[in-house]
């Protein structure tokens, strides 16, 4: 009997790839289009990412997968020469101080020179180095950051950073889920700042992506496994031990790996304890508004990789990426691609507001030559307080020989998903 993998996002595809390598009989149940959040679109001579845009180079698992697939030459670094993110405060874009590890400074000079934070907060941050070990344990990111670095650090660092990565707020995200290393520094040393300073400094490019867009990876996996695995292009409807229902028919499976996200997994396991627990994982939605400009239309040249907008600034846009600064390969030199992120699930109806907001923040008031809206409803799992305990409960409640993998478990980044998918596949192969 085959192993059934449900979901054709990067998690499910990585798992299917690993199982095929192990010469297992695999059925991949994945409705079109393949790739989930890894999808790229060509618009004239521009390449636009519809969902995810790059991975953290320090996490090697997606790059390793690209290399295994024979795509080594297509892995591209970000343009380190102009790596800089800005944070909006009172209408001004301030550089994110160099040497920050998320909310913890590891270099004094850039912090002291920055106008993003008040002198009182900077002093408070420096004094954090004097804290002794503590075992306060998991609490909200807001409580954790306020305790170590003060309220302003929550509003102008933690809030915009975590809104960008998790689509969540510091009040609802749990520190153990999203800042596990910092919690460990607190436990061992007391000071997050001293702990962060001892972490190895990242070398090489911060981000990597694919020359032909991230969509290259799912296409390549689908091509390479199609000779060995059976691929069913319809959604799974229900899962029970030893079988999966697809298009009204029960398909027998020795083992089942569900990699279709928590909301879908919860529905597939409806009526089970695991299904009920899975429904407790909250998700937020995001919409990406992508724009193409002609370089000569821009009065203000964009600097850096983009900017983050704290909630306190009360804007429509939550973050924006200057795509062609980060990855110049995405368009010819006379074109500029921008992606703006807005929290929630929105349609084209918001386009005018987004462009208006963009113009007020950047001073760029030009009409784009293309606009696109990519909607990602319920796509960002929220790691709340007690997240790992909930995951343990879910895994303990899973029906026999049914397993889970994906962004809602042990890390939301694409590399984490690859690692999780491959680890689960290896475990299934060995069990
Ligand atoms: C807007 C946005 C931007 C992001 N940007 C980045 C980034 O730049 N870098 C980074 O590292 N991470 C980024 N992430 C996170 C990362 O992209 C995701 O965590 C990761 O891609 C999730 O992969 P996945 O395969 O687990 O899930 P998904 O990509 O959601 O794929 C799940 C698949 O399962 C399928 N499915 C659903 N129900 C069923 C069913 N019943 N039967 C069969 N199949 C089903 C879906 O169609 C989908 O194809 C971003 C996330 C979002 C929302």
Image (cartoon, grey):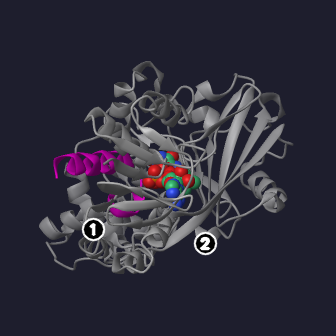
Span highlighted in magenta in the image: 407-431
User: Residue 73 lies in what quarter of the image?
Assistant: top left
Horizontal side of 127 relative to 85 (left or right) equals left
Number of on-image labels: 2
**Where residue 109 sits: x, y (%)?**
37, 48
Q: Nearer the viewer, residue 413 or 79?
A: 413
Q: Is the stretch drawn in magenta largely helix, strand or loop?
A: helix
Is residue 166 located in the magenta-colored stretch of the structure?
no
Does the image show residue 181?
yes
Residue 68 place in picture, x, y as percent: 34, 27
Instruction: Kindly report which numbered mark, 1 or 2, lies closer to the viewer in this rendering.
Output: 2
Whether residue 78 appears in this view of the structure is no
User: Sequence-wise, which precedes: disc 1 or disc 2?
Assistant: 1
Q: Which residue is mark 2?
A: 312
Q: Quadrant of residue 140?
A: bottom left
Q: Residues within 10 Å of mark 1 (few under 14, many from 20)?
A: some
Query: Which of the two residues, 244 or 342, is positioned nearer the viewer here?
Result: 244
Q: Position of residue 249 (x, y in %)?
A: 51, 59
* Secondary structure found at label 2: helix
Q: Which residue is label 1 attached to?
A: 127
Percent x, y for residue 332? 70, 22
Label 2 Cα crowd, 10 Å radius (few <14 / some 14-19 / many 20+)? few
Q: Does 318 sit left or right of 23 as displayed? A: right
Quick check: 261 above or below 329?
below
Foreground of the two, 359 or 51? 51
């Amino acid at each position: 009997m085959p192993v059934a993998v449900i979901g054709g996002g990067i998690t499910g595809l990585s798992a299917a790839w690993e199982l095929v390598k192990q010469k297992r009989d695999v059925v991949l149940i994945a409705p079109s289009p393949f790739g989930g959040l890894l999808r790229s679109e060509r618009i004239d001579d521009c390449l636009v990412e519809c969902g995810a845009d790059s991975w953290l180079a320090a996490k090697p698992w997606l790059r390793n997968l690209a290399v295994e697939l024979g795509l080594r030459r297509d892995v591209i670094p970000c343009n380190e020469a102009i790596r800089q993110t800005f944070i909006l405060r009172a209408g001004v874009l301030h550089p994110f101080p160099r040497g920050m590890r998320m909310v913890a400074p590891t270099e004094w000079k850039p912090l002291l020179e920055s106008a993003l934070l008040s002198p009182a907060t900077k002093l408070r941050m420096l004094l954090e180095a004097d804290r002794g070990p503590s075992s306060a344990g998991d609490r909200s990111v807001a409580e954790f950051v306020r305790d170590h670095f003060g309220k302003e650090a929550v509003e102008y660092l933690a809030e915009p950073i975590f809104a960008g990565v998790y689509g969540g707020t510091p009040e609802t995200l749990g520190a153990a889920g999203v800042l596990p290393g910092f919690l460990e520094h607190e436990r061992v040393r007391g000071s997050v700042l001293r702990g962060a300073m001892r972490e190895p400094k990242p070398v090489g490019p911060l981000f990597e992506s694919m020359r032909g867009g991230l969509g290259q990876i799912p296409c390549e996996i689908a091509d390479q496994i199609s000779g060995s695995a059976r691929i069913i292009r319809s959604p799974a409807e229900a899962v029970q031990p030893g079988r999966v229902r697809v298009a009204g028919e029960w398909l027998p499976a020795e083992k089942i790996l569900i990699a279709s996200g928590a909301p879908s997994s919860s529905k597939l396991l409806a009526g089970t304890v695991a299904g009920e627990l899975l429904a407790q994982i909250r998700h937020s939605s995001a919409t990406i508004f992508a724009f193409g400009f002609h370089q000569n239309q821009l009065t203000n040249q964009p600097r850096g990789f983009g900017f983050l907008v704290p909630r306190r600034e009360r804007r429509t846009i939550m973050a924006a990426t200057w795509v062609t600064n980060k990855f110049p390969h995405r368009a010819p030199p006379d074109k500029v691609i921008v992606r703006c992120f807005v929290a929630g699930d929105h349609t084209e109806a918001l386009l005018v507001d987004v462009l208006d907001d963009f113009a007020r923040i950047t001073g760029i008031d030009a009409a784009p030559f293309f606009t696109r809206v990519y909607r990602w409803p319920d796509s960002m799992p929220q790691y709340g307080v007690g997240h790992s305990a909930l995951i343990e409960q879910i895994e303990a409640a899973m029906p026999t020989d049914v397993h889970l993998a994906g962004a809602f478990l042990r890390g939301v980044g694409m590399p984490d998903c690859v690692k999780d998918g491959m680890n689960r596949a290896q475990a299934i192969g060995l069990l």
